[in-house]
């Protein structure tokens, strides 16, 4: 399993507010399927980040492109494979 960082830059704040419940429901669904490592919004309003777990870039992109934020053009989409290193204190 690989990790993919998906940056969701803000395109339309009004649409983002409108589609937030569907976006969060979608993430919960993907989380229950084991495809989400982490997610959250940027405090400065620039958008958010989702870390998907997938076998390939194509699989991760397919999931990210089904996000209601992306489908409804509330947010953009930028995706990169992420070589994660978890630091334990």
Image (spheres, rainbow, N blue to C red):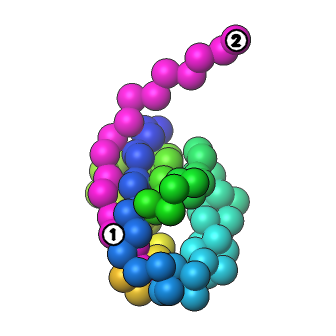
In this rendering, the answer to whether 80 lies above or below 24 is: above
Q: Residue at x 56, y 22 (%)?
A: 86
Q: Determine which quarter of the picture holds residue 60.
A: bottom left
Q: CA distance from mark 1 to mark 2?
A: 34 Å
- Residues at marks 1 and 2 touching, judged by CB atoms closer than 8 Å: no
Residue named by callout 2: 89
The magenta stretch spans residue 25: no
- Point 39% across, 55% down: residue: 7
Please tell me whether mark 2 sits on a helix, a strand or a loop.
Answer: loop
What residue sits right under mark 1 in the picture? 76
Location of residue 83 in the rendering, given as x and y in whole percent from the top left corner: 39, 29
Judge whether 27 appears above or below 57 on screen.
Answer: below
Bounds of the magenta span? Answer: 74-89
Q: Which mark is residue 56?
A: none
Is 4 drawn above or below residue 89 in the view shown?
below
Left or right? Give the position of 25 relative to 36. right
Check the image and name the residue furthest to the top.
89
């Amino acid at each position: 399993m690989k990790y993919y960082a998906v940056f969701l830059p803000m395109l339309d704040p009004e649409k983002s507010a409108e589609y937030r419940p569907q976006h969060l429901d979608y993430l919960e669904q993907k989380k229950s399927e084991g495809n989400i490592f982490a997610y959250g919004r940027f405090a400065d309003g620039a958008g958010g980040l989702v870390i998907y777990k997938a076998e390939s870039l194509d699989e991760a992109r397919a999931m990210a492109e089904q996000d209601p934020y992306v489908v409804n053009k509330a947010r953009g989409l930028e995706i990169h494979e992420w070589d994660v290193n978890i630091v334990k204190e």
